[in-house]
Image: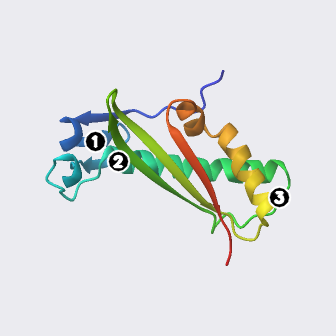
Amino acid sequence: MKTLYEATSTAVGGRAGHVTTEDGPIDLNLSVPKSMGGDGGDGANPEQLFGSAYAACFGGAIQAIAKNKDIDIDGENLSVTATIGFCEDDDGFFLEATLDCFIPGVDKETGEKLVKSAHQICPFSKATRDNITVTLNLMLDE
């Protein structure tokens, strides 16, 4: 396996702390949502950061599959909305994810194939496979 890129991030102070990346583009305060016993401040939280990263990566995977299969998609208007749930049961805490994928200009069959194929190659999907529930939805033009 050849490493193409590495990113280094540091969190200080846990969920109510601060995160930075070594090279500078991320420099954020964190806040714990009120529903989790926090102050609900204006900082980001790990679920928002994870969801943003998963959505971007999954969108890139859709674009890669489309390009590889010569399927013309509107990459500028392609969108993936990730909803990340922080859950608790008797075994502790866990996450769940829902990915709502909007691929303008494709029919349902093509869109479903793109989403399923992207789920196979997306590094975030691979990392979560068999670890959390991931629900995939294709959103179509009305």
User: Which residue ends up furthest to the left in the rendered image?
Assistant: 39
Residue displayed at 70% across by 53% down: 63
- Indicate the amino acid at tag 1: Val
Cα–Cα gap, marks 2 and 3: 34 Å
| Residue 71, label in figure | 3
Neighbour tally class for label 1: few under 14, some 14-19, many 20 plus, Cα within 10 Å: many
Comes first in the chain, label 1 or label 2? 1
8 is higher (above) or lower (below) than 19: above
Residue 73: % across, % down: 75, 64
Locate the N terminus by quadrant. Answer: top right
**For this rendering, which residue is in front, 76 or 115?**
115
Q: Which residue is mark 1?
A: 19
| Circle 3 residues within 10 Å: few <14, some 14–19, many ≥20 | some
Does residue 46 appear in this view? yes
Sequence-earlier tag: 3 or 1: 1
- In the rendered image, residue 116, in percent from the top left (x then y), is placed at 71, 46
Name the one closer to the observer, 53 or 112.
Answer: 112
Res 25 seen here:
no
Q: Residue furthest front?
A: 90
